[in-house]
Image (tube, rainbow, N blue to C red):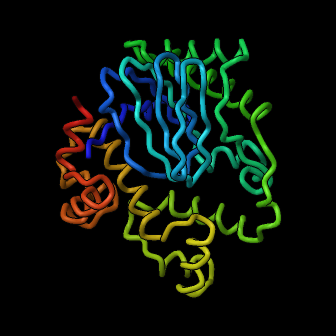
Amino acid sequence: MKITHEQILNKSIAPFKAFSFRSRDSSRIIPPHWHESTEILFVLSGKMNTTINGRLQEIKQNQFIIINPCVIHSTNALKNSHILCIQYPFTFLNLVTNGKFQQFFQFNSNLNSISSSTLSTNTINLVKVLETQDKDISINLSIYILGLQILQELIEKYLVGTHCSTNKNIPFLNEFIDFVSKHYTENISLHMVANHFGYSVAYCSRLIRKNLDHSFSDYLTSLRLEQSLRLSLQSNLNIEKIAEKSGFKCYRNLYNAFKKVYNCTPEEAFNQLKE
């Protein structure tokens, strides 16, 4: 299965990831995956198909969709489409909402129109800045400011209440995501996580699966795969070093993870990224 990924501005001061891309054909398919970030897909021109929790939706020009954390989704940008993607990390959204994101509300995940003139202007300006070749300090500041202005409008207009407010496991979920985000490149294990919380391994495993609908192993692998993709784009490290710095014990572990999740080898994936 073909895997594609865009170069994400990761060296700026922005506490989120933002990138734009133009699809020249309909083979641009990102297979089913999930992550801890909230992802917003703006279709500036053309169309994009998304499958979210098994439900297929078509996003048309001047529409956008918000994908909440830990939701399984895949995307297919159709021919001649122009897309803006912004990913706001869970820890960042939790910070700016005083620890209430997911616990008391999340984003409306329905299709929405870019009807607001402010939102339209900010998305267009962000794309212009992202596609500027000269990435100097002022450009980084512009990305930071525009990304926060977009987030402000999304929070003001597209938040919805959630029944998670009665879930006593929300503090655990928040701390778990933060803990693993800090240690996923290390030799972390479910036993270490359980010790961190003072829980038994079995109980900790059940909590993770109940709240994320994924096992600890799958969650950890997804973070490590994302890191390997970033390193392949932003460094000259060889594949063994990429595996090591992404938290995999050896190349074979990296290879097996790519085959399981993307049905391709790391080399195939990295080469496609740079095409």
- Asked if 137 appears above or below 161 in the picture, the reply is above
For the C terminus, the image quarter is top left
Q: Position of residue 245 (x, y in %)?
A: 31, 55
Which residue occupies 51% across, 63% down? 180
Q: Picture quarter containing residue 23?
A: top left
Q: Position of residue 57 (x, y in %)?
A: 54, 37
- Asked if 116 appears above or below 84 in the picture, the reply is above
Q: Nearer the viewer, residue 155 or 139?
A: 155
How many numbered marks have been drawn onto this rendered protein structure? 0
Which residue occupies 56% across, 72% down? 209
- Asked if 231 appears above or below 213 in the picture, the reply is above
Which residue occupies 63% across, 22% down? 145
Q: Nearer the viewer, residue 17 or 255?
A: 255
Which residue occupies 61% across, 72% down? 210
Please give left or right for residue 88 compared with residue 78 in the image.
Answer: right
Q: Nearer the viewer, residue 48 or 12?
A: 48
Q: Position of residue 37 (x, y in %)?
A: 56, 46
